Amino acid sequence: VEKAIKRLPGIREAVVDVLNNRALVFFYPSFVNEEQIRETIEDVGFEAALIEDDSGEGSIQICRLQIKGMTCTTCANSVEASLLAVHGVKKAQVALATEEAEIQYDPKFVSYNELLEAVEDSGFEAILISTGEDISKVHLKVDGMVESSLQALPGVQTVDLDETLNKVSIAYKPDMTGPRTFIEVIDSMGSGSFKAMIYPEERGKDSHKQEQIKQYYRSFVWSLIFTIPVFLTSMVFMYIPGIKHAFDIKVVKMLTVGELLRWILSTPVQFVIGWRFYTGSYKALRNGSANMDVLIALGTNAAYFYSVYIVLRAATSKHFEGTDFLETSAMLISFVLLGKYLEVLAKGKTSAAIAKLMDLAPETATLLTLDPNGNVLSEKEIDSRLIQKNDVLKVIPGAKVACDGIVTWGQSYVNESMITG
């Protein structure tokens, strides 16, 4: 029975349990279905009936999310814990370097919208990459915009038209149709007056990375503008007699010019430039965890508010003398922002290196056209973005594999540079 099942195309594994009179078969539904497997077993002389799987594992789907705002592994762990706490989530993995999360979930108990809400409730922005449902989406650029019967094609779920960009976004079931079909339909309309092609890929994630780098750079520069004078008045000018005397002039009772100036300059650093640490602390503490933002907020607040106490005591007393630590909080925030800037800069370069790996994928693939008996009628070179489900592709020795798939026949040698480097 095992041998008969394994001879079918698209069978990944088949195990027969003699004691329980059962067979467990893993297969690719694009090539074979349950009925064909059952008929094959009956052809070798045994009766077979499909047993429904009560475990529900067959309905597990994989959802991928892009998550913005994570700065450390604690943030990633917090998001992961929030996702795992959702009923119906089987497994969740969050990658800090790529800012993505992969979630295995049961759609009977939870939807991808609830997963998005779980991430946002933990204090981070989430963007849906893929839902795990057997629906694909393609973006086509159409020269000579057309509203056609794309919606009437079998397998098409939604059609969104953007006339300003000459763009058509089509959600479809890959088992029933694909991008080549859409392009052929559009090209055949209007006596050839319309021309369709794959829409150029948007670099949304790259722009987000660049914006994040610019934000940290601007924050660091602004913090330096305020911090350097604070540092000079507390650490440098005190050793220059003429300047020291000017900063020691009393403004109100025992409050000096230097103390007042440091207070004025350090306050924007603490509460404006350093506001991101307060929001990060709030999000972390709200979810019952502590991260680096909490540590930074505690340390800088301790130095700042103690110094505020010293300044107010000096302004209300004729004899009080104390030392403020306003330069400590300002310098600490500046150094942390410098570290954050260098971190996102390094992460950006890492992401760019990963993106370059994706660029190694071949731009074209060789598509075979087969007759009902499986004989090759013709072969054609197509854009690899136009590959559809159930296509049969030819891989010549030394070539790169254009997409995931299974070997239907033959053997070859492939370019493994994406794996080996």
Image (cartoon, rainbow, N blue to C red):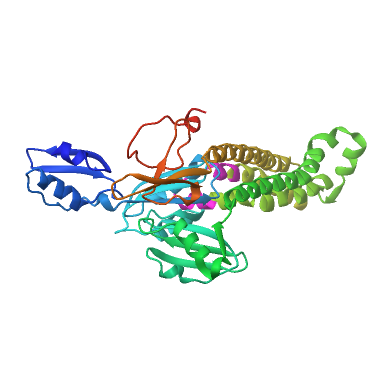
Q: Is residue 31 left or right of residue 367?
A: left
Residue 191 location (% of width, % of height): 54, 69
Residue nearer the viewer, 283 or 360: 360
Q: In this picture, which residue range is highlighted in magenta?
A: 282-297
- Please state, as top left, top right, bottom left or bottom right, where the N terminus lies in the image: top left
Give the quarter of the image for residue 258: top right
Horizontally, residue 113 falls left or right of residue 209, namely left
**Image-based side of 249 in relation to 405, left or right:** right
- The foreground one among 95 and 396 is 396
- Most common secondary structure along the magenta stretch: helix
> Toward which corner of the image does residue 194 lie, by quadrant?
bottom right
User: In the image, residue 106 lies at what x, y percent?
Assistant: 31, 54
Of residue 103 and residue 8, the one placed in the foreground of this image is 8
Query: What residue is drawn where x is 35% and y is 56%?
Result: 175
Residue that sits furthest to the front in the current view: 377
**Residue 44 percent across, percent down from the top left:** 10, 42
Q: Is residue 54 visible?
A: no
Q: Position of residue 256 (x, y in %)?
A: 82, 46
Q: Residue at 45% x, 38% y: name it.
A: 401
Which residue is situated farthest in the top direction here?
420
In this view, the residue farthest toward the right is: 242
Q: Magenta includes 220?
A: no
